[in-house]
Image: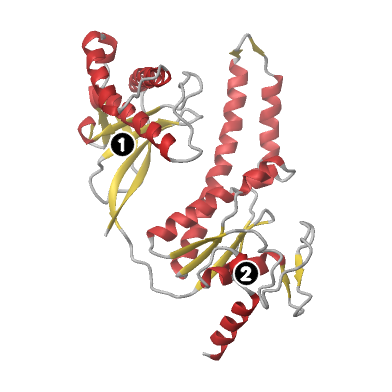
Amino acid sequence: MHEVVRYSFRLRPGRTAESALLAEWDRCRFLWNEAVHQQKSGNKPTFNRLSKLLTEARSQNTWLREGSQVAQQQTLRTYAQTLTQSFTIKGRGRPVFKARKRARVSLEYTRRGFSINDGRLVLAKGISIPVVWSRTFPSEPTSVRIIRDSLGHWYASFVVRRAVESAATTEIGIGIDWGVRATATTTDPSFDLPYLGHRARCAAELGTAQRKMARRRVERGQQSHGYQRAARVAAKLHKKAVRQTRHDSRVWAKGVVDHHGVIAVEDFKPIFLAKSTLARKAADAAIGAAKRELIERGVRAGRRVVLVRPAHTSMTCSSCFARAKQRLELGERTFRCHSCGYTDCRDRNAARVILAVAERGRTRVEDVSQSDHLLRAVGSVAV
């Protein structure tokens, strides 16, 4: 069994190669904006129609012919797919115009648009770029995407097929409750994901860089060189913290997936935290990224991943499944059951409730009654 994954590598383009990549991006961005104009004019820009228009435009426009037809076709294909998803997926926005100063550089090439010679990536139209090879391919890449981040660093993301590693068979379950004090609290304390605060650790350096940005003058939309240098330092600090948080989430998710067959995850949506006083800490914890990484790894490994709604998980006792009459305030970190006297950490109790709901084949606390929980618990103890 195989899976399709992406392998990303750092690129080191010279001035000539970088200028060629930016020129290619200008052509692809022009075609994207033309497709958006076609859609706003009332025409339905399908990929077949856009391909015919591209052929006509290349025959009449020398500037377009100087670029790669593969990259231009892939831009139109991506646009058509995005437009289709906007009609089929609820809440998905339609494609919009890409401004030169704000849009992220992204070029995509199929197998006939690139090759690898002597450790260098050779794109269509003879663009040769050195690559920092950090690992080997499991198979021949089928396509590559060239991107540039906010720091001006270039990366190549290859699509390859890789054999799925079979995880050890186990029936052990784990429940996961998300939070800010601890990013993830589980039923097993050894698998907790603590809040490490990478961005808070570099807050002093970040504050210095941001104060430099505030002192630099920006006149008539033109940024001074001092402002650009200070902005680059601040962006580097942000990216360093993001990478550290992403690495911790990946290591933690791999450990959870390798040792558990049933993974009950609180279907927590942290977007509302952006409007609270915990916005900065929640962004540093990256709950959404950790949750997404855990779910993707669990599905790839063939684990049973259950998303449980967070309603009433903090108010329900994991021992007798009785629900508290009043909602617990955020400052109350200890759960006490008035029915059976059970006492535990608030987040740990919620994680056990989430696991209990998932083990009973449910996704909501309301779907599990107190009698069903007690009968199941008695039966498991008797066995």
Q: Residue at x 67, y 69 (%)?
A: 349
Residue 226 picture quarter:
top right
Which percent across, then down, holds residue 55?
Answer: 22, 18
**Which callout, 2 or 1, points at the residue further toward the start of the chain?**
1
Kind of residue indicated by mark 1 = Val
- What crowding class fits label 2: few (fewer than 14 Cα within 10 Å), some (14-19), or many (20 or more)? many
Q: How is the image coloured?
A: secondary structure
- Residue sitting nearer the eye, 367 or 322: 367
Q: Amino acid at mark 2?
A: Val
Q: Which residue is mark 1?
A: 144
Q: Nearer the viewer, residue 106 or 54?
A: 54
Q: CA distance from mark 2 to mark 1?
A: 44 Å
Give the x, y percent position of residue 167: 37, 67
Residues under numbered marks 2 and 1 in contact, where contact means CB atoms less than 8 Å apart: no
Q: What quarter of the picture does the N terminus occupy?
A: bottom left
Could you say which quadrant of the image residue 223 lies in? top right
Decide: few, some or many residues near mark 1? Use Cα within 10 Å; few <14, some 14-19, many ≥20. many
Residue 281 placement (x, y as % from top left): 68, 46
Q: Is residue 146 visible?
A: yes
Q: Is residue 208 left or right of residue 53?
A: right
Determine the residue located farthest toward the bottom in the rendered image. Answer: 382
Residue to which mark 2 is pinned = 353
Q: Secondary structure at mark 2?
A: helix
Element under disc 1:
strand
Q: Residue at x 54, y 63 (%)?
A: 363
